[in-house]
Image (spheres, rainbow, N blue to C red):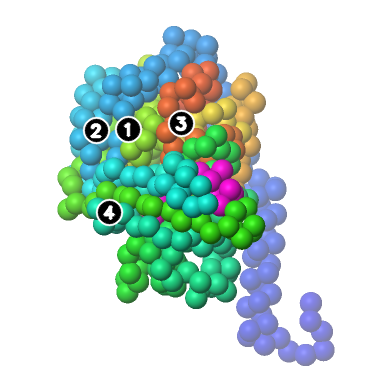
Amino acid sequence: MILGRKLTGRTMKFLLFVLFGVVHLLSLASGKAIYGNGPSQRTLQEVKEEIARYGDVAKSIINLSVYGKAQNRSYERLALLVDTVGPRLSGSKNLEKAIEIMQQNLKGDGLENVHLEPVKIPHWERGEESAVMLEPRIHKMAILGLGSSIGTPPEGITAEVLVVTSFDELQRRGPDAEGKIVVYNQPYTNYSAAVQYRMEGAVEAAKVGALASLIRSVASFSIYSPHTGIQEYQNGVPKIPTACITVEDAEMMSRMASHGNRIVIQLKMGAKSYPDADSFNTVAEITGSKYPEQVVLVSGHLDSWDVGQGAMDDGGGAFISWEALSLIKDLGLRPKRTLRLVLWTAEEQGGIGSSQYYQLHKANSSNYSLVMESDLGTFLPSGLKFTGSDSARIIMEEVMSLLKPINITQVLKAGDGTDINFWIQDGVPGASLLDDLYKYFSFHHSHGDTMTVMDPKQMNVAAAVWAVVSYVVADLEEMLPRS
């Protein structure tokens, strides 16, 4: 209370704002309405009681996936696809074949409204590539060209190397970079910090006159394994060839440079970009029984890089998303809202398929209760990452409590993902599956991304989490509240 003078209009508004915030927080704790933006005024206690009634359903899903006849099914389905088709690069025949097979599989599984939604996607091929150190000794290096990179002239590029550990160092030593191959030996602290060198390394090197760039692979662990990925050129900056090298070679060249050795590399890359190709997002549903126009979306991406088998990134995520619908269908369950499975195309090129899906469906964004994406591996989950309002988070915590039988109940922050960020930015709550990121980034975008990385028992658990969360949220009487 302010004494001794008349309250101004601005002061009164401020006090009312503060009072409203306090009342809102108290209402969450005391059982007052948590749905303030719709016709219903339901209390937290009522929502908790509603969710608790799904305990037996959750146990049925868990038992079927982890212990019952469906155990290992997602693993076996995935192995059949990736062993038969192999990696599925954007614009490739392999991706086309995988989409065709998945459409047939989803129809054969008895899912509803199975269809393909056409999109245009990038088509880049790496061609033949090699890098050989000529000085101070002969050493054939393992490399992987980065997506969208241009190639070298047929005779290659032979040039001296400048090794740097950061963009700041490159700027300081800019005059030394002209006419050279820039090698980045950036330290790995986490993926988001290190990946900027893969994304922007060629552009920053070109700005100071470099002929090519080689980037230390963005990986948490290496056994002489290069890791590819997308990179981006910038308008007005010359395009130069760029590739990833192994952690071991980047560190070796850094040591050589510190000893004053002159390093010379011959780089050859046959990379080439082609006109955009035709592709599809693959869609299947379990139609809602009461609110069919409302949607809970579960997803993973079907494309991959052209090395390994794309089993982990993101075959596992795509197949537990399919498995979630299979488990629900096998139990004879039909949620009130439509459960929609989307297998995205061209995620690795920057969420191309999901971007076009969003443009096609964004007019109905108010009907999306939750968007879910699994693209961080399907090892043993540690919890669910979630982005949404405080009220929605409280509800998600209650939903995750249904997974106590398998001890996976955490609701963490930052549920974003490349293929669902469009919806999250539009206010739709979003969730992603979190597990062992150290292991994930050890195999990410490398020749090591094969079925050998996958564990059927861990996939069973991941599928159970995905199915319980998607079904319960789709079957609640009301959509998740938004901010």
User: SS of the residue at dot 3?
Assistant: loop
Disc 2 marks a residue whose amino acid type is Asn
Which is more toward the observer, 156 or 126? 156
User: SS of the residue at dot 4?
Assistant: loop
Specify few, some or many for label 3: CA neighbours under 10 Å numbering under 14, 14-19, or 20 or more.
many
Task: Determine whether 394 is above or below 237 in the image.
Answer: above
Q: CA distance from mark 3 to mark 4?
A: 30 Å
**What are the residue bounds of the magenta stretch?**
242-253
For label 2, the residue is 94
Which is more toward the observer, 80 or 325? 80
Within the magenta stretch, is there residue 302?
A: no
Disc 4 marks a residue whose amino acid type is Glu
Residue occupying image coordinates x 53% and y 68%:
170
Q: Residue furthest bottom?
A: 5
Residue 31, quarter of the rendered image = top right
Horizontal and vertical percent for residue 397? 61, 39
Q: CA distance from mark 2 to mark 3?
A: 18 Å
Q: CA distance from mark 2 to mark 4?
A: 30 Å
Q: Are marks 2 and 1 in contact (CB under 8 Å)?
A: yes
Within the magenta stretch, is there residue 243?
A: yes
Label 3 vs 1, first from the N-terminus = 1
Specify few, some or many for label 2: CA neighbours under 10 Å numbering under 14, 14-19, or 20 or more.
some
Disc 1 marks a residue whose amino acid type is Pro
Label 2 vs 1, first from the N-terminus = 1
For label 3, the residue is 448
Residue occupying image coordinates x 57% and y 27%:
380
For label 1, the residue is 87
